[in-house]
Image: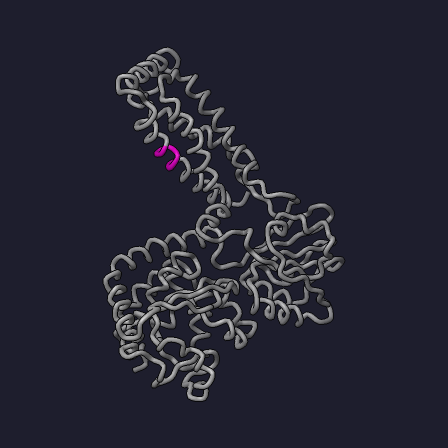
Amino acid sequence: MKVNILVKYGLRFLFLQAILTFVSIWYFDNYLFVSPELKYEIYLSLVEDRNRFYPYFPIRFVTIDTVIAILIFIFLVTLYTTKFYTYVNELNYTFKRNYLDEYLNIYLLWCSFLFSFLLLFRIFGLYRSNLIIVTFIVPTILFIFRNSEVLSLLLGRSVFKENFISINLATNSNLRNLRIMKYRVEVKALNVDLKNKPHLLAKKVNSINKESEVNLIIINLEEQKVLHKEIEDYLINLNKKVLIISNNKIKFKTNFIYREEYFENYYFAYFNNDIQYGSKYILKRLFDIIVSLLIFIILFPVIVLVILYLLIVDGWPPIIAQKRVGLHGKSFKMYKFRSMYYNTHHLRETLLPKNSKTGPLFKLDNDPRLIKGAKTIRRFSLDELPQLINVMKGDMSLVGPRPLFVTDTKYFDTKYMRRLNVLPGMTGLLQINDRNTSDFKIWYQHDIDYIENWNLYLDLKILLKTVPSLFNKKVQGR
């Protein structure tokens, strides 16, 4: 097993040991022991067992809390020896979602350990109703933290809602029962001549991604074992999950990290270059949820004032929803404070000749549609505050490329399609450097720089620089 996998499992083991020990001790102390006298009687029983069977064990460590910690440790060691908990193989056949089966396996194993432990250490006189509850608490925590799939589901990103495109895979192929496909939705099945017309792959995938969310690409090479270099480079830089299937061992021209398996007479090469996936996605979502809630609480008086002002000046509604493109091409409704007079957005087409920006960017120096005072609201980005709702829902992040309209994706070439593979944000590199730029190429460069260098530290740095940039005339382009 590789060192990085050992470190990953080790850290998760220590995390589970800490959280389960803390929760179990807290629950025992507050909900299971009938009285302090009973707890002390159990302690004396433990001391007696220590004197009889393991006198070498330091007396100061003989406590009920220590016994609980040892129980959790032994249970986790046993659990980690089972494949059903530590490893989910998406390249195996499956015919049903088995979350319930997985939970029951953990539950039954925990119950056998718990009641054996209570019997062995003569722990008695507990509240029976509360004892039943504790049989569910530990398995639930273990199930939630079993892998990133379950936690991502709770934070708003489910693999069951992910979409995939298949290339040269027969509709009746048994390979479609692989877990990686069975739980996802196929948006398109394509047939592409990968050998003679490799350029068509990127063209067709991008065309579909401009209309639908795409998370996974599955390619069946059949008898081929080598991809065209153009296709290989495209897939590696795609920032999505990619599965390549062949009847022969697959050979790549580029050195990169991928997982290789041989199963049912097929060779599989799987790699996941999704920038914000698994633990990275979980950390970003937790960061977004916590910080956006704090911002909402701090700026709540400002939000109320803006709502009241808009109601007085132009009436209902103060907040509008616009259809935008988000992560992997998923469409969502983005919320904004209405800065234009009601029902004037349709005038955009007639005002296009006066547009001062390039590409999909649209802005007028003196927009006749703006409500009185809206320039000030826009200057300090107060109209963006309702997007905190989008952040908490998981449609957006605090930091990322700005979400554009669905029709704007027609301007995206193969390279720029990558901007769809990270969560769109309320602020980003563009906003702290060239907020009001009229050049779409500058947008492009900032977005690609963010994608290629993304990490939580960069998000925090951009967030901290956002407020000062609102008052920086150089950044505003004024």
* Prevailing secondary structure of the magenta residues: helix
Which residue is painted at 33% across and 69% down in the image? 316
In terms of depth relative to the viewer, which is nearer, 73 or 350?
A: 350
Query: Is residue 21 rendered magenta in the image?
Result: yes
- Rendered position, 447 above or below 58: below
Quadrant location of the N terminus in the rendered image: top right
Which residue is painted at 33% across and 58% down in the image? 292
Query: Is residue 169 rendered magenta in the image?
Result: no
* Magenta stretch, residue numbers: 18-23
Query: Which residue is most to the front?
Result: 315
In terms of depth relative to the viewer, which is nearer, 381 or 248?
A: 381
- Quarter of the image for residue 164 reads bottom right
Which residue is painted at 45% across and 54% down in the image? 281
Which residue is painted at 34% across and 64% down in the image? 386
Query: Which residue is most to the top?
Result: 52
Where in the figure is residue 298, as x and y percent of width and height? 25, 59
Quadrant location of the C terminus in the rendered image: bottom left
Where in the figure is residue 423, as x and y percent of width and height? 45, 62
> Is 221 displayed left or right of 414 in the figure?
right
- Rendered position, 31 above or below 146: above
> Is 198 displayed left or right of 337 in the figure?
right
- Quarter of the image for residue 59 reads top left
